[in-house]
Image (cartoon, rainbow, N blue to C red):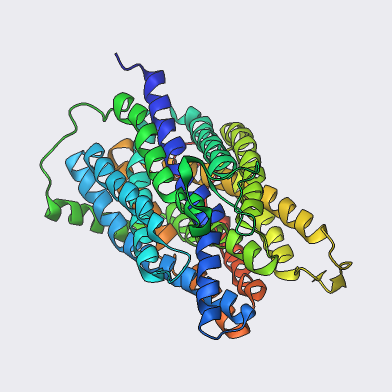
Amino acid sequence: MVTARKRIWGWYFFDWASQPYNTLLLTFIFGPYFAEVARAHFVAQGLTATAAGAEAQALWGYGQTIAGVCIALLAPVLGAIADGSGRRMVWIWAFSACYVIGAYGLWYLLPAQPDLTMAMVFFGLGLIGMEFATIFTNSLMPSLASEEEMGKISGSGFAFGYLGGIVSLVIMLLLFAENGVTGKTLIGIDPIFGLDATEREGTRAVGPFTALWFALFMVPFFLWVREPRGTHRAISLGTAMANLGRLLKSLPSRQSLFAYLMSSMFYRDSLNALYGFGGVYASGVLGWSVTQIGIFGITGAIAASLATWIGGKLDAARGPKPVIVLSIWVLIAVCCVIVGMSREAIFGFAFAPSSAIPDYIMYGCGILIGAAGGTVQAASRTMMVFHTTPERATEAFGLFALSGKATAFIAPFAIAVASDISGSQRIGVAPLIGLFLIGLILLVWVKPNGEKQA
């Protein structure tokens, strides 16, 4: 028998299973490896090292832009169809397959003569799979427990997910990902299973590893999570689109929901870009190796796990809005530091030659990004629950995904353009500050309890 507690833990396991796509692929292992390979490729074509780094960052941004547009266009429609039919699990199965195929395909990005377009296609497929699967798993959240427990459940789920990210990252760094110079892993051994360090097979294994991790740890989810009984109906595209149309038309009269969707459109897009470009920035501006970036990821993920768990309790006690506001201010401060710092100086104040201070500052930024980023995501999920009902949850979370992806092209595109124009990865991050501020301003019109009774 599947108890309520098992059902909640099964739901937590989706966060545990899916987090490595963000931790290993988007931010700390594959993203920097892609930047390293792309940078070498552009240098070989005659660009300077600085211009090649900016070009690699721009390409990474354009690839994520395309995936974001696909997610934005399809998320609300799929959500409406799922709510109309009452079916969520079949969609989770389908997009889980996209996740696994996309992640596995990253193995084929070779260090010499790399097919950068193919890598971005596989990465985009997996990212789309992860985002869409997340929509449908989030939509099951209102049926897990009472409204009073939503903050704790959301925070605990994210905390558990970040813990999974930490474990997967530690395994990659200790046993697989080789240093590009020494060919050794973090503990000084060759990559296991006879993987060839000269071909970067240890680092490239992050794709198949992430795919296998997801497939293995989704087992508890599929065994223990159930849809509400008696909800399955025939799929009607016409009815689904009509319901979606009514929801969209109602937004101007639902001030809190409308303001929240607009706000999250900007601050979540900025956060995703900060995740997506953090490792690329550290690689290009500070010259960090994949191993150093991995350690950076571990410290950030530990901070995220702890802060998100604490944030969930604060969310349950005070509501999600104060948690969101505080987190955004922290992220704005971090962006200011990143823009103002290089290997040589911070805000015009020079470091001593070969100083490790910029490294320590960046590690501190990673801790704050992890803590504030994880907390704002968990609280955002709770706030969305406060603006919907269990019957229309998938549709609402489809809109939530739309709000996070409708402008998903803006932050990566702004970074890409700023990087191209300035020729500087550091200046390229500056647009995120403005996007975070817009999100913060729009939160003024969001009710602390959403559309629930206080």
Pick the front one: 144 or 359: 359
Residue 281 on image: x %, y %? 62, 65
Instruction: Work out whether residue 397 or residue 117 is closer to the camera in this orientation and state it.
Output: 117
Q: In this image, 396 relative to 255: left or right? A: left
Where is residue 215 shown, x and y percent of the image?
Answer: 34, 37
Residue 261 image position (x, y, % from top left): 44, 56
Q: Is residue 230 left or right of residue 256?
A: left
Q: State which quarter of the image contains the N terminus.
A: top left
Residue 213, visible in the rendered structure: yes
- Residue at point 67%, 60% (across, down): 288
Q: Is residue 139 above or below residue 313?
A: below
Residue 116: x %, y % from top left: 41, 69
Relative placement, left or right, of 235 versus 270 is left
Q: Residue at x 72, y 57 (%)?
A: 362
Residue 318 occupies which quadrant of the picture? Answer: top right
Residue drawn 55% across and 49% down?
Answer: 177
Can residue 396 be seen here? The reply is: no
Q: Quadrant of residue 27?
A: bottom right
Q: How many numbered discs? A: 0
Residue at 55% in and 86% down:
46
- In the depicted structure, whether residue 22 falls above or below residue 111: above
Q: Nearer the viewer, residue 219 or 227?
A: 219
Q: Nearer the viewer, residue 283 or 335?
A: 283
Relative vertical location of residue 232 with respect to residue 95 in this rendering, above or below: above
